[in-house]
Image: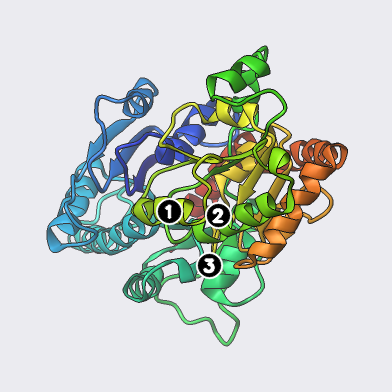
Amino acid sequence: MRLLWIINGTPHDQPQQQFLNYLLRFGACSPELPRPDAVCMLFIFAVNMDGRMVAAFRDYGADVRSLNARGPLSFTSLRAAYRVMRDFAPDIIHSQHAIAGIHARLAGAFYRLTLQLAGARKPRAGRRGGRVRIIAEQRNARHGLSRAARTLETLTFAAADLILCSSPGVECSWFGAAAEHIDPSALQLPRRGRAGGGRAAPRRHYTFFNSIDVNRFRRATAGMDRDAERRRLGLEPGQTALVTVASLSVQKNYPMLLRAFAAVQERLSRSTAARVVLLCVGEGDQEPRVRAMIAELGLGDTVRLLGYRTDIDRILFACDIFVLASRWEGLAKALLEAMSLAMPCVVTAVEGNQDVISSGQDGLLVPSEDAEALADAVALLIADPERAAELGRRAAGTVERFSVDRQACRLLQIYRRLLQHEP
């Protein structure tokens, strides 16, 4: 099996972690499952080719390439993607995110067609005749994209053999029907170009949960001195530290978060208010607006913008409550990482979040765009540390469902079913 992974690519390593997590775990799956004979990791945009992430892929034998595209989509970038496919000759093309997915499906469909035509002209024993498989992995809700992007995504879905959605909420946002978790052993796919004989076409979209290395942050923080980590962040003894790990973008809804935090401050006495701080980890194009709103609400002494950080494990370990005010989600890895460290979490009830958290059991859900409800939930946990700790303990148990160890083996099962399926 020759496997081509395609992802957007960023200057930072963290967004590329998912495929690396899979690669690191393929060897620990059942010996009965096929291992990739060759893996190519293709980035659409420029990445740090001398960075840790690329080095890790190469250490495990992957061929790493970048199109260095200057825009989201062009004939030049599609042609370059096709040339990579022609050169690498994959059996499976698996993409994540919208831009990478559109490249994978358009270039992949053309590549498959060229294989079929070549096979028809020069049939040879053992030639696969265009049996390249295309997987589109949808990592975010439909309404999180522009109208043009949604249209292109929908129009190119037909080129995919299988569409995997990161949460039930994401699947419902794209396809409307009830979500269904994928069972690799029972997977049935439609046959291309053949009538169904009056029968309903087999389903092509399923939920395949986003996942994390559940023990990664636990290993990293084992034996750490929490008081020392708090001092490193400038936290004073007795301060309650709220933390959000989210890009400064429209999606993450910092205006709601800041209004909620201001409401929390107003409900506390002056001496107590100074002992509650909000740490914001992330960067993005909304930073000027966020800074202006912090000043407007008089929160300059209690809200800290930390920017992009590579020590998220240590920051979460040092803080008390995780918050996320997203307008939409796929399935936020930052939420899963906070849960893995047994943090009490307060998040908006949007796709992904509500597929993970059972409100009142292992975290608290609040309506999107309701700053007062978010303030109430945060104030409740500040006033009741025992309840907060219990929610965190339960969250640490819940997050085991989203272990990448389990998902990596399921992914190999999916690949095997795709390769066994007749087109």
Nearest to the observer: residue 86 or residue 274? 274
Q: Nearer the viewer, residue 304 or 362?
A: 304
Q: Residues within 10 Å of mark 1 (few under 14, many from 20)?
A: some
* Residue at the extreme left: 76
**Which amino acid does the dot numbered 3 rest on?**
Arg
Q: Amino acid at mark 2?
A: Leu
The quarter holding residue 136 reads bottom left
Q: Is residue 144 left or right of residue 275?
A: left
Q: Which comes before the other along the chain, label 2 or label 1?
A: 2
At x 40%, y 74%, the residue is 154
Q: Secondary structure at mark 3?
A: loop
The C terminus - image quarter = bottom left
Q: Confirm or deny contact between disc 2 and disc 1 (CB under 8 A).
A: yes
The reply to whether the C-beta atoms of the residues labelled 3 and 1 are less than 8 Å apart is: no
41 and 162: which is toward the camera: 41
The residue singled out by tag 2 in the image is 258
| Sequence order check, earlier mark of 3 and 1 | 3
Q: Which residue is mark 1?
A: 290
Q: Is the residue 282 above or below the residue 95 in the image? A: above
Q: Earlier in the sequence, mark 2 or mark 3?
A: 3
Q: Which mark is residue 204?
A: 3
User: Which quadrant is the N terminus positioned in?
Assistant: top left
The residue depicted at 33 percent of the width and 53 percent of the height is 285
